[in-house]
């Protein structure tokens, strides 16, 4: 890296600024770049010429411009390669292939259990094969996978080891980064699903402009990510904000209270189990009917559907889970005081059924009441956050190469 204050370092900083603005704002003329970067016209001219010679940016053909312009229009060459975002969930594994701007080119879904996550070589071989198919489909002429980012439930250490994965049997202690490196010959990174979801929300979702937030990923289990002073806070072991593993004291009829992880009573898996138990009783007939008369087909979505239809048994199941979730959010909220709580993950699609109760309970138990937001990214949030992270990594590698 050039020494501080040297002309070479200033060239790198200026080039990074031009790349960042072209990625964020889209095609621009040199005059536009002078305006948005604050650099002088000669500096922008020099930087643009250098980046164009490296193939990092290029001219937009006149017939491809959104707005006619007399001056040359430049764009970030997002077609130089591809990035891959992987969401390894308990129920599904979603792969999104994108260009270097983060624009989706193709995607595919795998059934996680069918892909055998308890057999890492087989699982990552399946993921690699699916990726090759995506590349053949969407980028046969420019095939150049430059970065892969994967998100997983649980906790991922700073060096890429899955240290806690209760939803993925056999993954505790799995060195996810090493497995990814064996499957992909490019830059690879592993993160928790909640952290990547939060990144997606910051770049294109409800967390744009938010500086302090608690993101709660409501799926089969519960994950969470913390945004403090505009920065994602991971903690010493990568587990900051993971309320799903908080010890929750659960009272059992006729016995001493049992301590269980919060997600065991508040996650989608817990709602599924409670729904199945209810469906096996006479009072749970509405839930059973929605499952086609088969208790084993009751899922969390079945319970929410029955709740939406006004069934009191389903409502009781949902309320019990929401009250436990509220306790967890109120507890961590008391410690970090987030301005906003963002709900994401599959269960967030039913937030209209429980958000008022959740907010009321948190307001009752926490000293400060947060604002509330519900993700609009659906179940693609983790993979989209992974894509965004991967595209940023490619940009950082480019800037690092310019400094050498």
Image: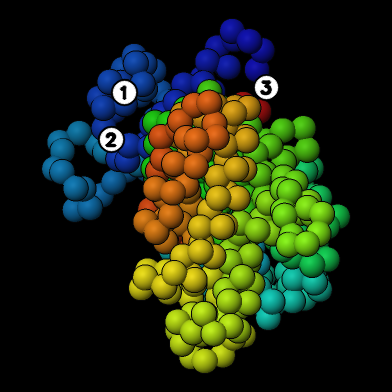
**Quick one: SS at disc 2?**
strand
**Quick one: SS at disc 1?**
helix
Kindly identify which numbered label has been placed on residue 36: 1
**Which quadrant would residue 38 be assigned to in this image?**
top left
What's the residue at 61%, 59% (across, down)?
A: 267
How far apart in space, not on screen, are marks 3 and 2 (Cα)? Answer: 29 Å
What's the residue at 68%, 51% (across, down)?
A: 262
Circles 1 and 2, Cβ within 8 Å, touching? The answer is yes
Left or right? Give the position of 185 relative to 280: right
* Above or below, comparing residue 347 to residue 129 in the picture: above
How far apart in space, not on screen, are marks 1 and 3 (Cα)? Answer: 26 Å
How far apart in space, not on screen, are marks 1 and 2 (Cα)? Answer: 10 Å
Q: How many marks?
A: 3
Q: Position of residue 105 (x, y in %)?
A: 43, 63
Q: Nearer the viewer, residue 240 or 230?
A: 240
**Which quadrant would residue 132 be assigned to in this image?**
bottom right
- Disc number lying in front (1 or 2): 1
Q: Residue furthest top?
A: 5
Q: Nearer the viewer, residue 169 or 75?
A: 169
Q: Which residue is mark 3?
A: 1
* Above or below, comparing residue 111 to residue 95 in the picture: below
Q: Which residue is mark 2?
A: 28
What's the residue at 63%, 10% (across, down)?
A: 4
Circles 1 and 3, Cβ within 8 Å, touching? The answer is no
For the N terminus, give its image quadrant.
top right
The crowd level at tag 3 (other Cα within 10 Å; few <14, some 14-19, many 20+) is few
Kindly identify which numbered label has been placed on residue 306: none
For marks 3 and 2 on the same chain, the one whose residue lies earlier in the sequence: 3
Asked whether residue 106 is in view, the answer is no
* Above or below, comparing residue 285 to residue 310 in the picture: below
């Amino acid at each position: 890296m050039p020494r501080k204050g040297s002309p070479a370092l200033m060239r790198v900083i200026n080039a990074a600024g031009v790349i960042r603005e072209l990625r964020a704002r889209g095609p621009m003329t040199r005059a536009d770049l002078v305006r948005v970067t604050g650099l002088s016209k000669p500096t922008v001219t020099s930087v643009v010429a250098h980046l164009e010679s490296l193939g990092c940016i290029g001219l937009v053909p006149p017939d491809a411009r959104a707005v006619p312009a007399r001056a040359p229009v430049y764009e970030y060459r997002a077609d130089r390669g591809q990035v891959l975002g992987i969401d390894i969930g308990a129920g599904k594994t979603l792969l999104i292939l994108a260009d270097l701007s983060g624009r989706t080119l193709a995607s595919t879904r795998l059934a996680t259990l069918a892909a055998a996550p308890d057999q890492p070589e087989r699982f990552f071989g399946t993921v690699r094969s699916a990726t090759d198919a995506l590349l053949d489909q969407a980028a046969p002429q420019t095939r150049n996978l430059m970065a892969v980012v994967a998100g997983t439930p649980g906790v991922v250490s700073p060096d890429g080891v899955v240290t806690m994965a209760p939803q993925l049997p056999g993954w505790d202690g799995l060195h996810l980064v090493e497995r990814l490196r064996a499957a992909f010959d490019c830059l690879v990174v592993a993160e928790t699903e909640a952290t990547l979801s939060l990144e997606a929300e910051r770049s294109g979702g409800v967390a744009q402009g938010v500086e302090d937030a608690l993101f709660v990923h409501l799926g089969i289990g519960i994950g969470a990510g913390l945004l403090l002073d505009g920065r994602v806070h991971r903690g010493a072991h990568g587990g900051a904000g993971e309320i799903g593993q908080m010890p929750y004291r659960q009272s059992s009829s006729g016995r001493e209270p049992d301590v269980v992880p919060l997600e065991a009573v508040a996650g989608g898996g817990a709602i599924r189990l409670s729904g199945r138990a209810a469906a096996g009783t006479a009072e749970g007939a509405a839930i059973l009917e929605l499952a086609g008369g088969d208790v084993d087909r009751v899922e969390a979505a079945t319970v929410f559907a029955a709740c939406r239809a006004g069934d009191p048994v389903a409502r009781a199941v949902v309320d019990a889970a929401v009250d436990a979730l509220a306790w967890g959010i109120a507890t961590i909220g008391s410690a970090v005081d987030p301005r906003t709580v963002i709900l994401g993950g599959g269960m967030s699609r039913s937030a209209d059924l429980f958000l008022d109760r959740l907010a009321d309970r948190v307001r009752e138990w926490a000293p400060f009441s947060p604002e509330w937001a519900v993700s609009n990214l659906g179940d693609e949030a983790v993979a989209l956050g992974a894509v965004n992270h991967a595209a940023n990594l490619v940009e950082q590698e480019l800037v690092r190469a310019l400094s050498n």
